[in-house]
Amino acid sequence: MVTLAMHMIDIVQNSLRAQADMVTITLDERGDESFLLFRVEDDGTGMDRISLERLTDPFFTTRTTRRVGLGIPFLKMTCEQTGGSLRVASTEGEGTTVEALYRTDNPDCLPLGDLEGSLLLLVMANPAIRFRFVYQVGKEAFLFDTDALREQGIDLQHPQMLTPVKRYIRENLEVLWRHRAPESYLC
Amino acid sequence: MIIFYIQIRMEHTTGIKTLADLKRIQEEVSKRIGLRDKAENPESLVQVKVAMATCGIASGAKEVMEFFALELDKRGIDAVVTQTGCMGYCFAEPTVEITLPGREPMVFGYVNPKKADEIIERYIKNGELVDGIIPQNYNTIES
Protein backbone atom coordinates (compact mmCIF):
# COMPACT_ATOMS: atom_id res chain seq x y z
CA MET A 1 0.00 0.00 0.00
CA VAL A 2 1.44 3.35 -0.98
CA THR A 3 -1.14 5.65 0.58
CA LEU A 4 -3.23 5.78 3.74
CA ALA A 5 -6.36 5.99 1.61
CA MET A 6 -5.57 2.52 0.23
CA HIS A 7 -5.24 1.16 3.77
CA MET A 8 -8.55 2.79 4.59
CA ILE A 9 -10.41 0.95 1.81
CA ASP A 10 -8.68 -2.28 2.81
CA ILE A 11 -9.32 -2.14 6.55
CA VAL A 12 -12.95 -1.05 6.04
CA GLN A 13 -13.48 -4.18 3.90
CA ASN A 14 -12.76 -6.21 7.02
CA SER A 15 -15.52 -4.35 8.88
CA LEU A 16 -17.93 -4.96 6.02
CA ARG A 17 -17.14 -8.66 6.02
CA ALA A 18 -17.84 -8.65 9.75
CA GLN A 19 -21.39 -7.43 8.94
CA ALA A 20 -20.97 -3.98 10.45
CA ASP A 21 -23.86 -1.49 10.19
CA MET A 22 -21.79 1.50 11.14
CA VAL A 23 -18.15 2.20 10.41
CA THR A 24 -16.30 5.17 11.90
CA ILE A 25 -13.04 6.20 10.30
CA THR A 26 -10.91 8.67 12.23
CA LEU A 27 -7.76 10.45 11.17
CA ASP A 28 -6.35 12.49 13.99
CA GLU A 29 -3.28 14.64 13.36
CA ARG A 30 -1.54 15.74 16.53
CA GLY A 31 1.08 18.20 15.47
CA ASP A 32 2.42 18.84 18.96
CA GLU A 33 3.17 15.15 19.46
CA SER A 34 4.13 14.50 15.80
CA PHE A 35 1.77 11.64 15.12
CA LEU A 36 -1.24 10.71 13.08
CA LEU A 37 -3.75 8.29 14.49
CA PHE A 38 -5.69 6.28 11.91
CA ARG A 39 -8.62 4.42 13.40
CA VAL A 40 -11.38 2.22 11.96
CA GLU A 41 -14.16 1.30 14.38
CA ASP A 42 -17.06 -0.98 13.56
CA ASP A 43 -20.02 -2.64 15.22
CA GLY A 44 -19.54 -5.94 13.40
CA THR A 45 -19.25 -9.47 14.73
CA GLY A 46 -15.86 -8.94 16.37
CA MET A 47 -13.20 -11.61 16.76
CA ASP A 48 -12.39 -14.31 19.28
CA ARG A 49 -9.08 -14.29 21.10
CA ILE A 50 -7.41 -16.81 18.78
CA SER A 51 -8.22 -14.80 15.63
CA LEU A 52 -7.05 -11.64 17.34
CA GLU A 53 -3.72 -13.23 18.25
CA ARG A 54 -3.12 -14.45 14.72
CA LEU A 55 -4.27 -11.23 13.07
CA THR A 56 -0.84 -9.90 12.17
CA ASP A 57 0.24 -13.29 10.79
CA PRO A 58 0.28 -12.94 6.97
CA PHE A 59 -0.68 -16.60 6.64
CA PHE A 60 -3.85 -16.17 8.63
CA THR A 61 -7.09 -15.46 6.78
CA THR A 62 -10.74 -16.43 7.01
CA ARG A 63 -11.01 -16.50 3.24
CA THR A 64 -11.18 -19.67 1.21
CA THR A 65 -10.14 -18.13 -2.13
CA ARG A 66 -6.51 -17.78 -1.09
CA ARG A 67 -4.27 -18.68 1.80
CA VAL A 68 -2.77 -15.33 2.77
CA GLY A 69 -4.23 -12.29 4.49
CA LEU A 70 -2.08 -9.22 4.07
CA GLY A 71 -4.33 -6.28 4.95
CA ILE A 72 -3.44 -6.04 8.63
CA PRO A 73 0.23 -7.13 8.22
CA PHE A 74 0.74 -4.38 5.63
CA LEU A 75 -0.85 -1.79 7.91
CA LYS A 76 1.36 -2.92 10.76
CA MET A 77 4.40 -2.67 8.50
CA THR A 78 3.68 0.83 7.22
CA CYS A 79 2.99 2.31 10.65
CA GLU A 80 5.91 0.55 12.31
CA GLN A 81 8.32 1.75 9.64
CA THR A 82 7.61 5.31 10.82
CA GLY A 83 8.26 4.34 14.44
CA GLY A 84 4.56 4.00 15.20
CA SER A 85 2.49 1.00 16.23
CA LEU A 86 -0.67 -0.98 15.59
CA ARG A 87 -3.33 -1.77 18.14
CA VAL A 88 -6.41 -3.90 17.59
CA ALA A 89 -9.18 -4.33 20.12
CA SER A 90 -12.15 -6.58 19.53
CA THR A 91 -15.08 -7.99 21.43
CA GLU A 92 -17.18 -10.78 20.00
CA GLY A 93 -20.67 -9.54 19.22
CA GLU A 94 -19.72 -5.91 19.76
CA GLY A 95 -17.21 -4.91 17.17
CA THR A 96 -13.60 -4.19 16.38
CA THR A 97 -11.33 -1.17 16.55
CA VAL A 98 -8.14 -1.04 14.50
CA GLU A 99 -5.76 1.75 15.39
CA ALA A 100 -2.54 2.56 13.58
CA LEU A 101 -0.23 5.24 14.86
CA TYR A 102 2.04 6.93 12.31
CA ARG A 103 4.92 9.17 13.32
CA THR A 104 4.63 12.25 11.13
CA ASP A 105 8.16 13.43 11.91
CA ASN A 106 9.45 10.42 10.01
CA PRO A 107 9.93 10.74 6.22
CA ASP A 108 8.64 7.17 5.78
CA CYS A 109 5.18 8.33 6.81
CA LEU A 110 2.72 7.39 4.06
CA PRO A 111 1.08 10.10 1.95
CA LEU A 112 -2.65 10.43 2.64
CA GLY A 113 -3.64 9.78 -0.97
CA ASP A 114 -7.14 10.17 -2.35
CA LEU A 115 -9.03 9.98 0.94
CA GLU A 116 -12.24 11.55 -0.34
CA GLY A 117 -12.42 9.45 -3.51
CA SER A 118 -11.72 6.24 -1.61
CA LEU A 119 -14.28 7.05 1.06
CA LEU A 120 -16.98 7.84 -1.48
CA LEU A 121 -16.45 4.61 -3.38
CA LEU A 122 -16.94 2.74 -0.11
CA VAL A 123 -20.10 4.75 0.52
CA MET A 124 -21.36 4.18 -3.02
CA ALA A 125 -20.80 0.44 -2.94
CA ASN A 126 -22.39 -0.02 0.48
CA PRO A 127 -25.65 1.94 0.61
CA ALA A 128 -26.90 0.14 3.72
CA ILE A 129 -23.90 1.08 5.86
CA ARG A 130 -23.61 4.28 7.84
CA PHE A 131 -20.13 5.72 7.42
CA ARG A 132 -18.72 8.38 9.66
CA PHE A 133 -15.45 9.99 8.67
CA VAL A 134 -13.75 12.27 11.14
CA TYR A 135 -10.62 14.23 10.30
CA GLN A 136 -9.04 16.13 13.10
CA VAL A 137 -6.07 18.48 13.18
CA GLY A 138 -5.39 19.67 16.70
CA LYS A 139 -8.63 21.17 17.96
CA GLU A 140 -10.19 21.60 14.52
CA ALA A 141 -12.28 18.78 13.08
CA PHE A 142 -14.36 17.88 10.05
CA LEU A 143 -17.11 15.29 10.29
CA PHE A 144 -18.66 13.55 7.32
CA ASP A 145 -21.66 11.43 8.25
CA THR A 146 -23.56 9.61 5.51
CA ASP A 147 -26.77 9.76 7.59
CA ALA A 148 -26.53 13.56 7.87
CA LEU A 149 -26.06 13.91 4.10
CA ARG A 150 -28.91 11.53 3.30
CA GLU A 151 -31.14 13.52 5.64
CA GLN A 152 -30.46 16.55 3.45
CA GLY A 153 -31.64 14.53 0.46
CA ILE A 154 -28.18 14.04 -0.99
CA ASP A 155 -28.03 10.90 -3.11
CA LEU A 156 -24.63 9.39 -2.36
CA GLN A 157 -25.34 6.48 -4.69
CA HIS A 158 -25.60 8.64 -7.78
CA PRO A 159 -22.40 8.85 -9.85
CA GLN A 160 -23.10 12.48 -10.72
CA MET A 161 -22.88 13.40 -7.05
CA LEU A 162 -19.48 11.72 -6.72
CA THR A 163 -17.45 14.70 -7.96
CA PRO A 164 -19.32 17.41 -5.98
CA VAL A 165 -19.22 15.42 -2.74
CA LYS A 166 -15.53 14.74 -3.30
CA ARG A 167 -14.94 18.46 -3.66
CA TYR A 168 -16.98 19.15 -0.55
CA ILE A 169 -14.75 16.84 1.50
CA ARG A 170 -11.56 18.07 -0.16
CA GLU A 171 -12.31 21.75 0.45
CA ASN A 172 -13.04 21.12 4.10
CA LEU A 173 -9.88 19.04 4.51
CA GLU A 174 -7.79 21.77 2.90
CA VAL A 175 -9.06 24.24 5.50
CA LEU A 176 -7.96 21.83 8.25
CA TRP A 177 -4.56 21.19 6.71
CA ARG A 178 -3.69 24.87 7.14
CA HIS A 179 -3.41 24.10 10.85
CA ARG A 180 -0.85 21.37 10.26
CA ALA A 181 2.55 21.70 11.92
CA PRO A 182 5.20 22.78 9.37
CA GLU A 183 7.60 19.97 10.33
CA SER A 184 5.06 17.26 9.53
CA TYR A 185 5.95 14.94 6.64
CA LEU A 186 2.26 14.29 5.95
CA CYS A 187 1.12 15.23 2.49
CA MET B 1 -24.35 21.52 -23.73
CA ILE B 2 -23.60 25.19 -23.13
CA ILE B 3 -25.92 25.28 -20.12
CA PHE B 4 -24.23 22.21 -18.71
CA TYR B 5 -20.87 23.86 -19.13
CA ILE B 6 -22.01 26.99 -17.31
CA GLN B 7 -23.31 24.86 -14.45
CA ILE B 8 -19.97 23.15 -14.08
CA ARG B 9 -18.22 26.54 -14.15
CA MET B 10 -20.55 27.81 -11.45
CA GLU B 11 -19.91 24.79 -9.27
CA HIS B 12 -16.26 25.41 -9.79
CA THR B 13 -16.20 29.07 -8.91
CA THR B 14 -18.65 29.13 -6.01
CA GLY B 15 -17.03 26.33 -4.02
CA ILE B 16 -18.63 23.44 -2.18
CA LYS B 17 -17.95 23.94 1.48
CA THR B 18 -21.23 23.32 3.23
CA LEU B 19 -24.07 20.82 3.17
CA ALA B 20 -26.25 23.60 1.78
CA ASP B 21 -23.92 23.87 -1.25
CA LEU B 22 -24.20 20.12 -1.77
CA LYS B 23 -27.97 20.27 -1.45
CA ARG B 24 -28.12 22.92 -4.15
CA ILE B 25 -26.02 20.77 -6.49
CA GLN B 26 -28.16 17.73 -5.70
CA GLU B 27 -31.24 19.67 -6.80
CA GLU B 28 -29.56 20.61 -10.08
CA VAL B 29 -28.46 17.01 -10.66
CA SER B 30 -31.93 15.66 -9.84
CA LYS B 31 -33.49 18.03 -12.38
CA ARG B 32 -31.01 16.93 -15.01
CA ILE B 33 -31.46 13.21 -14.48
CA GLY B 34 -35.15 13.26 -13.55
CA LEU B 35 -36.21 11.70 -16.82
CA ARG B 36 -33.59 8.99 -16.89
CA ASP B 37 -34.25 7.17 -13.68
CA LYS B 38 -32.75 3.79 -12.92
CA ALA B 39 -34.84 0.77 -13.79
CA GLU B 40 -36.44 -0.84 -10.78
CA ASN B 41 -35.39 -4.31 -11.76
CA PRO B 42 -31.66 -4.84 -11.16
CA GLU B 43 -31.72 -7.78 -13.60
CA SER B 44 -32.09 -5.32 -16.44
CA LEU B 45 -28.99 -3.37 -15.41
CA VAL B 46 -25.38 -4.01 -16.23
CA GLN B 47 -23.67 -5.13 -13.04
CA VAL B 48 -20.03 -4.24 -12.52
CA LYS B 49 -18.25 -5.68 -9.51
CA VAL B 50 -14.71 -4.51 -8.86
CA ALA B 51 -12.61 -6.83 -6.67
CA MET B 52 -11.42 -4.69 -3.78
CA ALA B 53 -9.45 -6.82 -1.40
CA THR B 54 -5.84 -6.06 -0.45
CA CYS B 55 -4.54 -7.41 -3.77
CA GLY B 56 -6.99 -5.38 -5.85
CA ILE B 57 -6.53 -2.13 -3.93
CA ALA B 58 -2.74 -2.38 -4.16
CA SER B 59 -2.98 -2.79 -7.94
CA GLY B 60 -5.25 0.19 -8.53
CA ALA B 61 -8.84 -1.08 -8.17
CA LYS B 62 -9.94 2.29 -6.82
CA GLU B 63 -9.11 4.11 -10.07
CA VAL B 64 -10.86 1.37 -12.04
CA MET B 65 -14.01 1.51 -9.95
CA GLU B 66 -14.13 5.30 -10.15
CA PHE B 67 -13.69 5.10 -13.91
CA PHE B 68 -16.57 2.64 -14.32
CA ALA B 69 -18.88 4.64 -12.04
CA LEU B 70 -18.27 7.96 -13.81
CA GLU B 71 -17.96 6.74 -17.39
CA LEU B 72 -20.97 4.38 -17.45
CA ASP B 73 -23.09 7.26 -16.24
CA LYS B 74 -21.58 9.70 -18.75
CA ARG B 75 -22.14 7.26 -21.61
CA GLY B 76 -25.75 6.74 -20.58
CA ILE B 77 -25.50 3.06 -19.65
CA ASP B 78 -27.73 1.94 -16.77
CA ALA B 79 -25.40 0.08 -14.47
CA VAL B 80 -24.71 -0.72 -10.85
CA VAL B 81 -21.07 -0.46 -9.86
CA THR B 82 -20.15 -2.19 -6.62
CA GLN B 83 -17.28 -3.89 -4.86
CA THR B 84 -16.59 -7.51 -4.18
CA GLY B 85 -13.87 -9.36 -2.32
CA CYS B 86 -10.91 -11.26 -3.68
CA MET B 87 -11.96 -13.88 -6.23
CA GLY B 88 -8.64 -15.71 -5.92
CA TYR B 89 -7.14 -14.19 -9.07
CA CYS B 90 -4.64 -12.04 -7.19
CA PHE B 91 -2.11 -12.42 -10.03
CA ALA B 92 -4.49 -10.66 -12.42
CA GLU B 93 -5.67 -7.74 -10.30
CA PRO B 94 -7.45 -5.45 -10.71
CA THR B 95 -10.19 -7.88 -11.69
CA VAL B 96 -13.72 -6.93 -12.61
CA GLU B 97 -16.79 -9.14 -12.88
CA ILE B 98 -19.36 -7.93 -15.38
CA THR B 99 -22.86 -9.31 -15.73
CA LEU B 100 -24.80 -8.18 -18.75
CA PRO B 101 -28.59 -8.60 -18.43
CA GLY B 102 -29.50 -12.24 -19.02
CA ARG B 103 -25.90 -13.34 -19.47
CA GLU B 104 -23.41 -15.31 -17.39
CA PRO B 105 -20.99 -13.20 -15.31
CA MET B 106 -17.66 -12.59 -17.02
CA VAL B 107 -14.42 -11.90 -15.17
CA PHE B 108 -11.77 -9.65 -16.69
CA GLY B 109 -8.23 -9.41 -15.36
CA TYR B 110 -5.48 -6.77 -15.48
CA VAL B 111 -8.06 -3.99 -15.80
CA ASN B 112 -6.83 -0.41 -15.82
CA PRO B 113 -8.82 2.65 -16.95
CA LYS B 114 -7.70 2.07 -20.57
CA LYS B 115 -8.83 -1.56 -20.46
CA ALA B 116 -12.02 -0.49 -18.71
CA ASP B 117 -12.75 1.86 -21.59
CA GLU B 118 -12.33 -1.01 -24.06
CA ILE B 119 -14.60 -3.23 -21.91
CA ILE B 120 -17.34 -0.58 -21.89
CA GLU B 121 -17.14 0.14 -25.61
CA ARG B 122 -16.81 -3.43 -26.84
CA TYR B 123 -18.16 -5.86 -24.24
CA ILE B 124 -20.82 -3.84 -22.42
CA LYS B 125 -22.12 -1.97 -25.46
CA ASN B 126 -21.79 -4.68 -28.12
CA GLY B 127 -21.27 -7.97 -26.29
CA GLU B 128 -17.94 -8.53 -28.08
CA LEU B 129 -15.36 -10.47 -26.10
CA VAL B 130 -12.10 -8.67 -25.38
CA ASP B 131 -8.70 -9.87 -24.22
CA GLY B 132 -8.11 -10.54 -20.56
CA ILE B 133 -11.04 -12.82 -19.72
CA ILE B 134 -10.37 -15.20 -16.87
CA PRO B 135 -11.99 -18.53 -17.77
CA GLN B 136 -14.70 -19.82 -15.42
CA ASN B 137 -13.04 -23.22 -15.11
CA TYR B 138 -9.92 -21.74 -13.64
CA ASN B 139 -9.26 -23.26 -10.21
CA THR B 140 -7.15 -22.03 -7.35
CA ILE B 141 -4.41 -24.31 -6.03
CA GLU B 142 -5.86 -26.76 -3.54
CA SER B 143 -3.96 -27.41 -0.36
Image (spheres, rainbow, N blue to C red):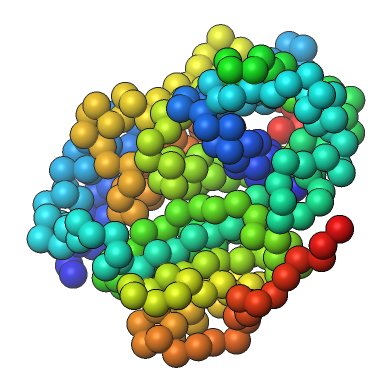
Relative to the observer, which residue lies in front, B47 or A143?
Answer: B47
Relative to the observer, which residue lies in front, B111 or A171?
Answer: B111
In the figure, A178 relative to B12: above or below? above
Q: Is residue B84 left or right of residue A185?
A: left
Q: Position of residue B75 (x, y in %)?
A: 31, 73
Q: Residue at x 28, y 47 (%)?
A: B11
The quarter of the displayed image where residue A153 is located: top left
Relative to the observer, which residue lies in front, A51 or A16?
Answer: A51
Q: Residue at x 44, y 64 (%)?
A: B48
Q: Position of residue A3 (x, y in %)?
A: 70, 44
Q: Is residue B64 left or right of residue B99?
A: right
Q: Residue at x 77, y 12 (%)?
A: A33
Relative to the observer, which residue lies in front, A167 or A46?
Answer: A46
- Label total for image: 0
Q: Residue at x 48, y 79 (%)?
A: B119
Q: Position of residue A124 (x, y in %)?
A: 41, 46
Asked if residue B17 shows in the view, the reply is: yes
Q: Which residue occupies the extreme front position in the image?
A: B143
Q: Is residue A37 left or right of residue B133?
A: right
In the figure, A164 relative to B33: above or below? above
In the figure, B95 relative to A31: above or below? below
Asked if residue B69 shows in the view, the reply is: no
Quadrant where the C terminus of chain A is found in the figure: top right
Q: Position of residue A83 (x, y in %)?
A: 89, 25
